[in-house]
Amino acid sequence: MANQTTAAAAVARSFLQAASSEDVVPPLRVVQIEGLAILKIIKHCKDLSPSLVTGQLLGLDVGSVLEVTNCFPFPMREEDDEVEAEGANYQLEMMRCLREVNVDNNTVGWYQSTLFGSYQTVELIETFMNYQENIRRCVCIIYDPSRSNQGVLALKALKLSDSFMDLHRNNTFTGEKLREKNLSWVDIFEEIPIKVSNSSLISAFMTDLEADLPVTQCDFDRLQFSSSPFVERNMEFLIECMDDMSAEQQKFQFYYRNLSRQQAQQQAWIQKRRAENMARKAAGEEPLPEEDPLNPIFKPIPEPSRLDSFLITNQIANYCNQVNGVAGQNFNRLYLMKALQDD
């Protein structure tokens, strides 16, 4: 009987351990995406460039790996309720059709195109939060056709950090809350490494084709020095971001001036009330409270949200990194051409 009780307790502990292990979600380490899905994303974004497009990512969430096995584009949306309803019906119909042909139809996120890296917006964060309501883990794959024209596959997978999502749910982007969470502008997004995966047949076929491929015009295009339009547009966007940052700083300066003025008024009112209470005390009357909640000078001034300034700072850093990357590539080409001329 004692052995049966011990065995039952061991089984119960094992069940509890299994249940607790299911609740612990491992952190997302890598996004594994099929080569065919990447080609679909690139084709959709390039065909409709410079228009911004979006699409659905389908796949599986397996441990610390998010597998993206398929995708499909969204129709171009307009600011119309009927058109948005048709878009939602289109997504449901597409996923139903994929399920009928036994293709992965689990939503794991979405992809979208961008121009010159201008993707860090409030709309992107709101889309992330809407997805998080229904999906435990999701990513957004960003593709930049303008950056890819410089000889780089500008593809990245992003997710929101957990600490940032907690603040966004409470809508508390004040300086005090940010200091408590130790959150800075670099902690909004987390970039997840992308791993391209292909089946063995596709890898063997590509290996067989690789030896017979001649040198294409794309290979020669990598040696071009004409990256001035890309750098110019980045500098234009950078100037706009600096103007936006200046406007945000003026907003906070106005807030702190009003706060300082209010504190001075409160101190003056409290000093006056203390003098009045001393006179009342001398006359044998009850003293009045030092702070009057009905007085408008004691009404707290709402602090402006720091979310916009964080996003602008992120965008400025992104533009600077892009200019730095293109300039570095140009220097490499210059050194290469100089070496060829010396030979």
Image (tube, rainbow, N blue to C red):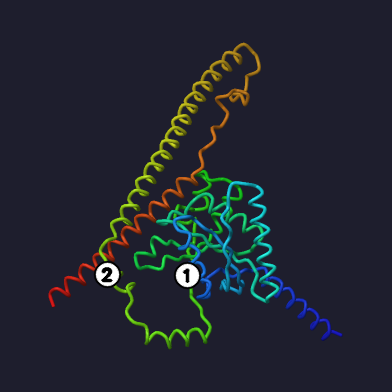
Image point (34%, 82%), residue name: 214
Q: Position of residue 310 (x, y in %)?
A: 46, 49
The secondary element bearing badge 1 is classed as loop
Image point (73%, 78%), residue name: 14
Towards the viewer: 180 or 31 = 31
Mark 2 residue type:
Leu
Pick the quarter of the image with the N terminus.
Answer: bottom right
Marks 2 and 1 sit apart, C-alpha to C-alpha, by 28 Å
Residue linked to disc 1: 193
Image point (30%, 69%), residue name: 221
Of the numbered discs 2 and 1, the one sitting upstream in the chain is 1
Q: Where is residue 86 in the image (x, y as percent from the top left)?
A: 66, 55
Q: Residues within 10 Å of mark 1 (few under 14, many from 20)?
A: few
Question: In the figure, is residue 185 to the left or right of 319?
Answer: right
Q: Position of residue 194 (x, y in %)?
A: 48, 71
The secondary element bearing badge 2 is classed as loop
Towards the viewer: 263 or 174 = 174
Position of 286 relative to 15 (above/below): above
Pick the quarter of the image with the C terminus.
Answer: bottom left
Foreground tag (2 vs 1) = 2
Residue linked to disc 2: 223
Q: Position of residue 65 (x, y in %)?
A: 56, 73
> Looking at the rendering, which quadrant does residue 155 occupy?
bottom left
